[in-house]
Image (cartoon, grey):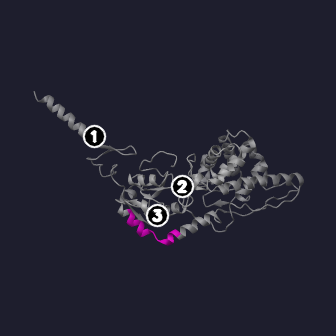
Amino acid sequence: MKYLPLLIVALLFSCQKKENNNVVTPWGSVVDVEGTNSDTIPTDDDTYTLEDIRKNGQMIMLTLTGPATYYDYHGKGMGVQYLMCEKLAEYLGVTLRVDVCKDTLDMLERLNNGEGDIIAVPLRKEHQKGFITCADSWAVNIDNKALADEIVKWYNPQILAETKKQEEYILTVGSVTRHVNPFMLSAEKGTISVYDNLFRKYAPSAGMDWILMAAQCYQESCFDPQAHSWAGACGLMQIIPTTADHLALPRSQMYQPEPNISAAARYMRELQSLFKDVTNPQERMKFALAAYNGGYNHVRDAMALTKKYGGVWQRWSDVRRYILALSQPAYYNDPVVSYGYMRGSETANYVDMIMDRWQQYRTALRTGTKIVSKVPTRKQVHVRPMNTKSSLLDASPHRASKENKWR
């Protein structure tokens, strides 16, 4: 009996030692490294191998924001390096997650720490030390030779050339498939399109002049209810599927004129509400149109730049300058910018053309004078539909990421 206290202490110490062998992974799971699950999930000290990537069904791409690397374009990933990495993920049979890093050193550190599988940015030679380089000077962890070998087997210069052509096609002639209808049916009769009654019906709920809604619709689809884009945008007002879900527009009704216009009106009302700090209603409408086209977050980035550099951040003409500037590294890498590179010329042109067309329509309806307008230049007409693989950015992470503005 005199040894019983010592035995109890020994047992408690043994239990405590076993408990300390449990490892908490970055995503919150507890792994018993000595138990039956010890070989199912790598610990923090392990590199994710090709086998692990395939087992988890996801590859993490580390990148920088920029026109050639990665940026958001109408809700889809764009950039030659991103598009190539998406093809690689498809080849490996996994989904692709994109983590946008602050700078090159951040990328290298995160790859070295196992927070990503591949750096899909061409690296200079001084940054390649300690990693395996492959494909277009991409880098993988030195302990992940199997992934590097698979990339070497997959890659050839023709893939890069084809990817560049694919992006060029999307950004020039491949944006929207549609029939170009007349700019205006009859100025004398006061008829812009066959959908005027729907614009009149739903524009008030959006806080818009119905003529302005008609001008926006012509910019989006040239009044073709069957118009569709490579990014999945559908119908008269070019609503993308995820936005349709948000607006409670059934996907089966996305090509139907009335549900499509009704949903667009709800969306424009919502966007205007997000710019309540723009007190002038006419100015607020321009901000909402810009967000409809280029994304709310990019517009907010341009507003932050405008404020930083002394402009009037509530005035569209001032913010427009920085919408355009977001295509330049000095601005899209500015500390006040949270969402990176933007093809700002398209958004600036989008707002300009709609506002110009609105004035043309108003003049024509008032005077009965026939007018001729150019076909919207942002989205050119083509006859062959684009079959582009959907972005997989929303896949669930299998590793934690640093929470910062660059994600």
The residue shown at (30%, 52%) is 39
Where residue 13 sits: x, y (%)? Answer: 21, 35
Q: Is mark 2 on a helix, strand or loop?
A: loop
- Mark 1, residues whose alpha carbon is within 10 Å: few (<14), some, or many (≥20)? few
Indicate the amino acid at tag 1: Asn
Q: Name the residue under label 2.
A: 65
Q: In this view, does 95 lie to the left or right of 255?
A: left
- Tell me, for residue 20, which label it has, or none: 1
Q: Locate residue 305, reporting x and y percent.
A: 62, 47
Circle 3 residue:
88
Q: How far apart are marks 3 and 2 (CA)?
A: 19 Å
Q: In this view, does 393 lie to the left or right of 5?
A: right
Q: Residue at x 69, y 40 (%)?
A: 278
At mark 1, the secondary structure is helix
Residue 152 in the magenta stretch? The answer is yes
The residue stretch that appears in magenta: 147-160
Circle nearer the viewer, 3 or 2 = 2
- In the image, 117 versus 366, the foreground residue is 117
Whole-percent x, y for residue 165 in the image: 58, 69
Q: Which residue occupies the foreground of this view, 174 or 402?
A: 402
Q: What element carries label 3?
A: helix
Amino acid on which the number 3 mark rests in the picture: Leu
